[in-house]
Image (spheres, coloured by chain):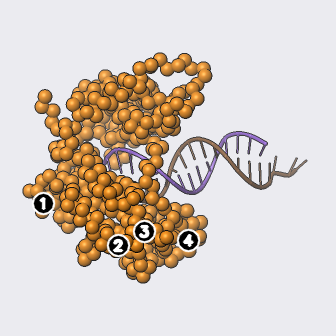
Chain colours: A orange, B purple, C brown
Amino acid sequence: MQTVFALVDCNNFYASCEKLFRPDLKHTPVVVLSNNDGCVVARSKEAKVLGLKMGVPMFQVKDEIRQHGIVCFSSNYVLYADLSNRVMTILEEEAPRVEVYSIDEAFMDLTGVDHVTDLLAFGKKVKAKVDQWTGITVGIGIAPTKTLAKLANHAAKKYPATGSVVDLMEPDRQKRLLSLVEVGDVWGVGRRTMAKLKARGIHTALDLANADAKAMRSEFSVVLERTIRELNGVSCLDLECVRPTKQQIICSRSFGHKVTEKQELREAIAKYTTRAAEKLRGEKRLCRVVSVFIRTSPHVKNEPFYSKTLSVELPNPTDDTRDLLEVTNVIFRRIWRAGYRYMKAGVMLADFYEHGVFQQDLFRVENNKVNSKALMAVVDHINQSGLGNIFFASQGVSPQWSMKREHLSPAYTTKWGELPKVF
DNA sequence: TCTGGGGTCCTAGGACCC
DNA sequence: TCTGGGGTCCTAGGACCC
């Protein structure tokens, strides 16, 4: 049977989430800022019309924002995650298999649906349901491969006449669309590859589809070969319905201001360690390799640049925050250099194990943290309840280095998490 | 003054082994 | 004087995605 994929993508997702609870901003241009209010990471359609670009640093567009009365929001991931879950739940009711690809995108398996109903009609129904139940508008692209479904979705957004749903099952329609799309807009073709392709006279998605897959594999990569096959309707990428377990956990942030004090940086590292450990326990894994990095800004001229990463392998895997804090603190002391203005730091965990499958180190005294599991469970429970927050002393009590979030919206849908603490 | 965060996959090259 | 070939594993870095 011919496979059928649908790609459902929420429009201007973060900006739409913010607008949902602010009907007064219905026609106002809105942007959402990255952590630290550093860059523009989402724009409402009104903001796009004004020519605001994705990813631009805030300080470069300050004037435009004031001039056009654009409303800014600091990113509020608790809110976006909650609305994302609502959308995904609806999609899961409509199809037997769904792959949640990112916070605002999902692939659906529609194989066989076309025996029962028209694919376009089905797509319109799903779109209407999401719209009615959540207030989020989506675009839907339907095609025999994931890469073509992405392209169909691209068209659904670009051409209003489509009603935001495009059925691209017909090879003739595929060809026509491919000829209209720039090669850089193909899923999997980034900036670098696009430049190389154009230098070889490949400008449109159709040019790429017509290229010799084998030859392109040796010249570029197996990834591009797969993309070419997918553009020709040969499905190479399956749905991944069960999220694969993470291979790596990263917790890093840029600072609200440059950090020069050792103690401040140490507290930041402790904070990221704690957060990374929480994520690790959320994955129900133990980790054995721990890395810490610190760096200064590469953008500042006339200032020495310093960037250092150091990894350590533990004798036994752990998920205990105390073990991890111990290690990251040791690493930090080894990579710390005085006299720099640090911009960013982070903690990475890797080499994961399931509980109970690791061969303990024969020559090491058994970990004496006998209450580890229970203690960590209590800490996580309290912190996730939204009713309080307990933390390790090494994080410090009044961090100077924390993020700038000057335009944060309230937690409309989740209880206490992000509300101002009034008690 | 101010430039996100978190992830995956692939490849090339070195070390090492037989 | 002669100095192979094939394989694995690991790591760093590139490229891409949202």
User: Distance between the Cα atoms at labels 2 and 4?
Assistant: 35 Å
In this rendering, the label closer to the viewer, 4 or 3: 3
Please tell me whether mark 2 sits on a helix, a strand or a loop: loop
In the rendered structure, which disc, 2 or 4, sits on the residue that comes first in sequence?
2
Residue A252 rendering spot, x and y as whole percentages: 36, 40
Q: Position of residue A113 (x, y in %)?
A: 39, 68
Q: Write down the residue under mark 2.
A: A117
Neighbours of disc 2 within 10 Å: few (<14), some (14-19), many (20+) = few
Q: Residue at x 52, y 75 (%)?
A: A211
Residue at the image point whose x is 12% and y is 60% from the top: A26
**Local SS, label 4:** helix
Q: Amino acid at mark 1?
A: Lys
Q: Which mark is residue A26?
A: 1
Protein chain holding label 2: A
Q: Quadrant of the C terminus of chain A?
A: top left
Disc on the earlier residue, 2 or 1: 1
Which element type, helix, strand or loop, lies under badge 3? loop
Q: Left or right: where does residue A260 sit relative to residue A171?
A: left
Q: Is residue A55 above or below residue A231?
A: above
Look at mark 4 in the image and give the residue it sits on.
Answer: A213
Residue A344 in sight from this viewpoint: yes
Sequence-wise, the earlier of marks 1 and 3 is 1
Eye-nearest disc, 1 or 3: 3
Q: Residue C11 lies in what quarter of the image?
A: top right
**Which residue carries the number 3 mark?**
A112
At numbered mark 1, what does the secondary structure look like: helix, strand or loop? loop
